[in-house]
Amino acid sequence: MKPIENGSHRSVIGARIVALRARAGLTQAALAKRAGVSLKTLYTIERAAPGTNFTFLSLEAIAGALDTDVAELMVPTAPETR
């Protein structure tokens, strides 16, 4: 597997969360509430600004709220239809 280039992992994860959230028909506020993270945390992760830091626990909570796993958030391709 090709490693993700330095810094690009943030944009891959952010884009995947945005796509999965949209597919689920959720707003940022609804996903944040469902995941038990702050709206600011979700916004920051989705935005993937340089210097953005987030915990694995946050990703785990967001993935769970999207009915997927953390590994799927790190794949820069569309998820398989379940």
Image (cartoon, helix red, strand yellow):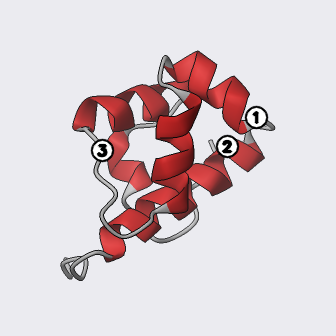
Of 70 and 15, the residue lying toward us: 15
Badge 2 is on which residue?
21
The residue to which callout 1 is attached is: 26
Q: Which element is circle 3 on?
A: loop
| Circle 2 crowding by C-alpha within 10 Å: few under 14, some 14–19, many from 20 | some
Give the Cα separation between the discs numbered 3 and 2.
18 Å
Left or right? Give the position of 33 relative to 61: right
Distance of label 3 from label 1 (alpha carbons)? 21 Å
Q: Nearer the viewer, residue 44 or 70?
A: 44
Q: From the image, which quarter does the N terminus lie in? A: bottom left
* 69 displayed left or right of 38: left
Quarter of the image where one finds residue 5:
bottom left
Q: Answer whether labels 3 and 2 touch (C-beta < 8 Å).
A: no
Q: Point out residue 71 in the picture as x, y percentages from the top left corner.
A: 32, 49
- Classify mark 1: residues with Cα within 10 Å, few (<14), some (14-19) or many (20+): some
Name the residue rendered at 58%, 27% in the picture.
32
- 60 or 58, nearer to the observer: 58
Label 3: how many Cα within 10 Å (few below 14, some 14–19, many 20+): few
Amino acid type at image mark 2:
Arg
Which numbered disc flags the more N-terminal residue, 3 or 1?
Answer: 1
In the rendered view, tell whether residue 42 sits above or below residue 2. Answer: above
Where residue 22 appears, as percent x and y from the top left, is 75, 48
